[in-house]
Structures are given as C-alpha cells and as structure tokens.
Image (spheres, rainbow, N blue to C red):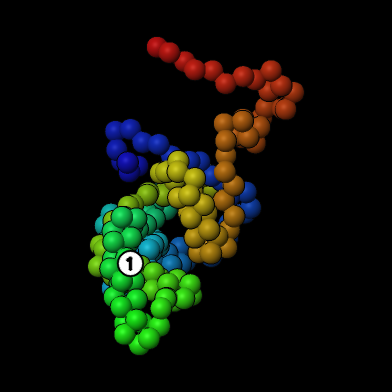
Amino acid sequence: MGILSASVSFTLYKVEVQVSDELFKNIQERLRLYGFKEIEELSVERGAGWVCFDNWLDSSFFTSPFKGQYAVFSLRLDTRRIAPAVLKKHYEVALKELLQKKQEQGQKFVAREEKKELKENIRLKLLTKTLPVPAVFDVVWDMEKNFIYFCSVREKVQELFVDLFVRTFELQPILLTPVNFMLKELGFQEDDLKDYKPQVLVR
C-alpha cells in the first residue's frame, strides 16, 4: 500500500548526521542518476531504482520530488520468476535433444559441466520470455527532522532500499525500532525499559 492509502505499513528510519543544504538541493539529480531502468528486454531476474512518486513510470523525475518540507519518491522493483516446473520441462527437452546429437557423434553421455551450462542457457532464454512483475514502495523523507518513512516491512525490500539509499545519497539510514525510538527520540533511559514487555492490545 502507498503512503496515501487509508491504511499503510511502513518502516521508520532516521539519518543521524547533519545533511548539507547542497545535498538537499541535488536530491532530484541524484534520484535521476539512480532512476529505474526497464528490464523487459534484458535476461535478468530483478531490476530496481527510483521513480517519481506521482508517476511510477517516470524515472527521469520531470516532476519535482519536493512537497513542502518533504522529499517524496518511490522505489520500483521489477521481478521475474520462472516456475521450477517450467524450467524443468524445457531443460529436460533440451537435454534429450543434446544427448541425441551426442549419440549421433558416437558419444554416450552429456558431461556435468555441459548440463550446467545448458540449464543456465535455458533459464536465461525463459527469462527474456517472462514479463517482470512491478512493485512500488513509497518513500517520504522529512528534511527537517531527517525521518524517513519507507512503505514496506519486508526484510529483503528493506535491505534493497537501504543499499540504494546509501549509494544514491551517501548517507546511512538507521532503522528505528519502537525501543530505540523511545531511547533516541523520546528521551527514555535504558533503565526505564528494563521491565518492558511487548503487549497485544485487544479492543
């Protein structure tokens, strides 16, 4: 769900160093530099990059990402998946044809390395025939408080976001869990939380 949905799950980060005005001025250019590149014509399983918050097909950022004190943009992740049964079928058909050619040449078997190479070639061929499935995750960066709201709680997506954010802005976003949020932002001391126990509230 996007940040404008009626309900949304997000992960909270903070940049704990002072961010220069120069970097904020160049956010749009940095986003453009690491903008999403289409992978439909490529034999790769995954492609990721930034896109415009207002238009997830726009990775050139013709529209400014600035909304008041916030920089708002999105992470687009396109993923291809080949069903194991599909890969197995095409591999076994190709292996049978290769073995037949080998036998016609007087050879009795297909070497292990040849099988490995054949399977990889089949996988790459199928990738080009499989349309990638897109997913978009919104990012809201409060430039005054340096909080970053990332609309995903999936660990692998979070790792991708942090990696791309660091490469784009040369800044390390720190994950704020409820406990370290209380310690870092609300002024609690560790002794205050020694008896803390998670609670499930039922209304």
Q: From the image, tell me which residue sits under label 1.
A: 91
71 versus 36 height, above or below:
above
Q: Residue drawn at (29%, 38%), measured in percent from left and top?
A: 5
Q: Position of residue 52 (x, y in %)?
A: 33, 59
114 versus 196 height, above or below:
below
Residue 23 at least partly seen: no
Q: Position of residue 101 (x, y in %)?
A: 31, 82
Q: Quadrant of the C terminus?
A: top left
Q: Residue drawn at (28%, 68%), measured in percent from left and top?
A: 93
Q: Residue drawn at (34%, 55%), measured in percent from left and top?
A: 84
The answer to which quarter of the image holds residue 87 is bottom left
Left or right position of 67 against 201: left
Which residue is the extreme one toward the top?
Answer: 203
135 versus 43 height, above or below:
above
Left or right position of 169 against 63: right
Q: Residue drawn at (34%, 81%), measured in percent from left and top?
A: 103
20 versus 124 height, above or below:
above
Question: Mark 1: which amino acid?
Answer: Tyr
Q: Residues within 10 Å of mark 1 (few under 14, many from 20)?
A: some
Residue 185 at least partly seen: yes
Which residue is the extreme one toward the right?
Answer: 191
